[in-house]
Amino acid sequence: MDDTQLMKGILEGCVLSIIQKEETYGYEILSSLENSGFENLGEGTLYPVLTRLNKNGYISCRKAKSPLGPIRKYYSITEEGKNYLENFKQVYQKVIHNANQILLERNEGDLC
Amino acid sequence: MDDTQLMKGILEGCVLSIIQKEETYGYEILSSLENSGFENLGEGTLYPVLTRLNKNGYISCRKAKSPLGPIRKYYSITEEGKNYLENFKQVYQKVIHNANQILLERNEGDLC
DNA sequence: ACAACTACTTTGTTTTACCAAGTAGTGTAA
DNA sequence: TTACACTACTTGGTAAAACAAAGTAGTTGT
């Protein structure tokens, strides 16, 4: 089964949360996400998220040379981004709570 | 903030889970979802989900008269639907677990 | 006759993840 | 030195799903 639909919207919040912890760049965020269990994420999935967050003013961008590859684009969270993330977390937790109630509820047939 | 993106994919599992509990019909599922906190769900959101689940063979359909309105379409879960739902729950829990790790992690600045 | 509630349908829009391919810089080994 | 591997970002096209808005109909109550 495919998890692409479940990823919708969640990814954006996760990326913003990672950037909030410290200034970082795309390629590093990718491996950070992989370490947290999001294993099948392509670059073509992540980079548009960063572009979108930047365009919406939730993160800002700074270019810097890499010691072992092409130039990096370092992103850091803005004040607007912090507010957005707090709000996102609340909505996320509400949705998850509602879904858990429906999905994980005991059924009649369940043993104890 | 908008939760439409977070709803993607989650809704399908919730609807299937509700049908698994007992045979039911669209309009009732809608109020069931509203009772669980999904308050802004339109009919134009739910009915396509039912059509999709039916077309994929996860639910079956039976028509029956309503005591107070037009004819109802009662849905019940199929064996294939049960398998799909179990699988869905596993993927769902994995995604949520991964996301929680990133979103709810303590930051350096946090007190205690 | 008309409104209110029940109940399902359809059409079009928007957002987003994903795939595939491309562009480039740096280091390593045949 | 040529080729490969790794780093790092970009772009274009596709498909899936939620949603808004409008419509169709049956039943009940005033």
Image (cartoon, coloured by chain):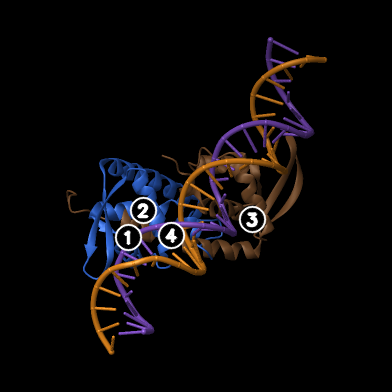
Chain colours: A brown, B blue, C purple, D orange
| Mark before the other along the chain sequence, 4 or 1 | 1
Asked if the residue under mark 1 is in contact with the one under mark 2, i.e. CB atoms within 8 Å, the reply is yes
Name the spot of residue C28 as percent of width and height, x first. 70, 20
Number of numbered markers: 4
Q: Mark 3 lies on which chain?
A: A
Residue visible at 56% across and 43% down? A32
Residue holding disc 1: B26
Residue holding disc 2: B50
- Residue C5, by quadrant, is bottom left
Question: What secondary structure is marked by label 1?
Answer: helix
From what the image shows, is residue B90 above or below residue B24?
above
**Residue A53, numbered label:** 3
Q: How far apart are marks 3 and 4 (CA)?
A: 27 Å
Residue visible at 18% across and 54% down? A108
Q: Which of B14 and B48 is in front in this view?
A: B48
| Mark before the other along the chain sequence, 2 or 1 | 1
Q: Distance between the residues labelled 2 and 1?
A: 8 Å
Select label 3 or label 1 by which is in front. Answer: 1
Q: Are the residues under badges 2 and 3 in a single subunit?
A: no
Q: Distance between the residues labelled 4 and 1?
A: 11 Å
Asked if the residue under mark 1 is in contact with the one under mark 4, i.e. CB atoms within 8 Å, the reply is no
